[in-house]
Image: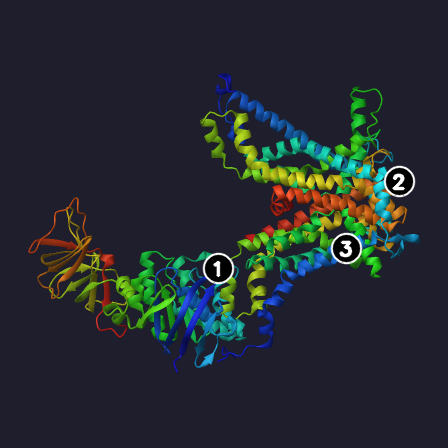
Amino acid sequence: MSTERSRIPALKDRVMENDWIRFLISPGLGIAWILLFLFLPMTIILVISFSIPGDYGNVIYEFTVENYRRFWTADVYQNIIFESLLYGVVVTLLSIPLGYTIGYFLGRSKTDWKWILLGLVVLQYWVPFIIRTYAWIIILSNNGVLNQLLLGLDVISSPLNIMYTDYSMILGLTVSLLPFMILPVYVSVSTIDEDQIHAAKTLGATDFRAFREITLPQSMPGIVSGVLFVFIISAGAFLAPVLLGGPGTRMIAPVIESVFIQDFNWPFAAALSIVYFGIIGFLLYLFNRRVDLEEALETGAT
Amino acid sequence: MATESDHATTGETGADVERGYFGITLASRTKWNLIRAATVVGYVLMLLPLVVIVINSFNPSRLGNFPPSSLTLRWYEELLADTTMLRALWNSLLVGISAAFVAGLVGTLTAMGFVRKDFRMQNALVIVLLSPLLVPPIIVGVAATIFFSQIGIGRSLGWLIVMHALLGLPYAFLIIRSQLYLFDETLEEAAQSLGADRVTTFREVTLPLIAPSIITAMVIVFVISFGEFTATQFWVKRTTTTVPVVIFSMLRTSISPKIDALATVMLVVTIVVPLFILGIRRYLLRN
Amino acid sequence: MSFLELDGMRKEFGDLVAVNGVSLDIEEGQFVTIVGPSGCGKSTILRSITGLETLTDGEIRLEGEDITELPPYRRNIGLVFQDYALFPHKTVFENVAFGLKMRGAPETEQRERVEEMLRMVNLEGYEEKYPKECSGGEQQRIAVARAMAFDPDLVLMDEPLSNLDKNLRTSIRSELRRIQDETGVTTIYVTHNQNEALSLGDKLAVMNDGRLEQFDEPETVYRNPQTRFVADFLGRSTEVTGRFRRDDGGPLVELDGGHRMRVPDDESLGDGDQVSLFLRDEKLKLVNGNRPSVNVIEGSIESVDYRGRDINYFIRVPGIDQTLQVSHIADHSTETFRELGDTVAMHIEPENVTCLPAGDEAL
């Protein structure tokens, strides 16, 4: 009958069943991809950061700590990194109240609108940063939407010069990154069983205390995840400072870009990158000690 | 502190359903309304920019007097005539779709390895897989540029595809893995007991059943790739330029509603198209 | 050389030894049941035979060939899963034909076979349905059809009835036996249910804690337990004979001495069939107070075996040869003791009566 089959293990069976080969593909393939195209380049720029810049982006492979020395001695670069982190903190702090409120609203609300609203937030993720940032130019510039509106309503007599300042950048960043705070908070708030809060209220808790004792602690994972993403993205942001910020706003990403592209100084750009990444990495390490990093990443990313 | 008036009850309305636990006390209702107000503000802030862009793309005035006095399609026409932009659009689409496939493929294979058996180092490896999310894109851009130039590979679309797949891989991995967790292993065992070898089992049983998540993952990777700028700006040359890069350079040189037109097109691509695909996917799932 | 030889099977999961040196020989065409409590390793044995688990030690030989190292898809063994594991995205036809498709059978042959199999499990016409459109009992039969469609050398069933409700269980149980009779395929059936174990197989293997306790014909195992575990596990029963009948109230057995007892239904039994009833000692209960409406037998206590917590009463019932042994757990505070010569009434729930065809080749 045609259903007879040989019981001799074929060669391809040996291959398919081999544990090592299977590990190589799965998860090996993904890991290899990351190692090859992320870790390896990072290692190379580490090496390069100890090299000498040649002309037009060439690199001379001689060991030097000049780049780091330059960073260390020139206050300028240290300040830039410090300011970047500071702005990161500011944006994060600003985004927490509004982001949490919206996430909370979505998490507790029961209307049918909820899904549409949620969808709108998810949609925000899909709008490229460049567009979100550019939109603020239109709104905040001197003949932009905001000014036209305020002028038209006679609230002000001459246009507000808020474009190309720290404030416009902070505003742009905060609003752009709101979804990163809203969704994780929504996820963690929505998993809180409402009955817990009802129970707390029957036990005498006011709205506020019930919130503080029950909801807030359990929504911490969401907040933590949101903070993680908002901070890292805003401190290392490129578009917002460049498009919305003024000449006085100096953030690390545009600086790295100018050193890299305009000065053609690859080693120094590499050094700056390494330093900045080192700081971020260190902060992440500290972060990881108090919070499960993997969990936070996953909550935020999905 | 709760007072008498806090607990004064008022009649239930339809809106009460919406409020969840806040119940029906007067003070509670005020608080909820405040929250609602804040939410509205938030949404206005988030959505207003987009609305503005779309409307402005029809603005005949070059300097962007807002709101526009009349509407014109002039900018879209210019767009269609501009070969640089058309090429950028084509590149972005090509790279986006390719990166989606690559990330989908690699993501699926990778996720399968994490769901089967627990093995040591699993957590560490997951963090490795998620690391592209943590490295600021500017650094990824610089690092990759230096890397490729040092090993002698010139800028190309392939380069873009590879790197965009890298950036999208964490998302693809997470999405597919989460559906794999729900997948019933015994189905694969049944297939094997019936004579399907591992590859066949994957093709006949596993793949069809996790296809929805793979599609979702691919859509996400496409969206990410299409809108990626910060790292990509270092990776393109004139012929491989992408839409975000073009928009950026236009912003530096000449501001006109043409940008809005391109941005609107971009919005359409990154929102409407994925929604459409997801809608198809949901429709297929029903059957 | 037997058809299937399990030789010193051993499977470890880290520190846990799931299967500890089990050896069994099974002849072609036999229906073998493996019974044991949860965790005794019976499922592991099944999965090892199929190849879904790899043995830590030992060999499996099928028709003399060593298949221990073969991956599952080369073994030609059908497995019916406990939760059926039907492919939800494929039709019933595609499910049942899957094994054939894997072996390259042409479409015409697939169609023929599937039709044949569906007819055999009484599911004709179900080809285009999807598993989720079918009931639990139907899904179970599809799973059986699928496992047998490609003419395997061996069919394994992993507690296939445990997800079904009681009535379905008994009816499908006899169907399975019938199918096996018709096709003659060697079958290993795993269960934790003793009724199934005793009534289904040609041979019965009792397992406990990874070890094989006894492997023999069910009646032998039941009557002559070789180990304490088997004795405890299968219990002591009194056997009485009678004839099977059905009336308005359902199936019943007329005992030779004139008593009538309600028994669980069995499709394979017809009116007038000779049967043996096994009345377990712990299932026979002394009637105290409310008198149940069925299965009450009166007799007098012939002897008492007092063991502290348990008391074994041996009760002489007119019309029944042996004394019925009743194992009784005494509540010392509330009851009064029965004494020799007391008249008592005993009751056993119909579902607790084991009813087997007398002198059937199954035993």
Q: Which quadrant of the figure has residue C196?
A: bottom left
Q: Position of residue A239 (x, y in %)?
A: 79, 41
Q: Position of residue C61 (x, y in %)?
A: 44, 78
Q: Which quadrant of the figure has residue C116?
A: bottom left
Q: Which residue is mark 1?
A: C130
Nearer the viewer's eye, disc 1 or disc 3? 3
Q: Which residue is mark 3?
A: A43
Mark 2 nearby-residue class (10 Å; few <14, some 14–19, many ≥20): few
Q: Secondary structure at mark 1?
A: loop
Q: Which residue is mark 2?
A: B254
Give the chain of mark 3: A
Q: Position of residue C304 (x, y in %)?
A: 12, 57
Q: Give the residue type at disc 3.
A: Thr
Disc ID at residue A21: none
- Considering every residue shown, the one lying at the far left of the view is C341
What residue sits 89% from the left and 53% below the top?
A52
What residue sits 70% from the left and 42% below the top?
A283
Q: Is mark 2 in CB contact (under 8 Å) with mark 1? A: no
Give the chain of mark 2: B
Mark 3 nearby-residue class (10 Å; few <14, some 14–19, many ≥20): some
Q: Give the residue type at disc 2.
A: Ser
Mark 1 nearby-residue class (10 Å; few <14, some 14–19, many ≥20): some
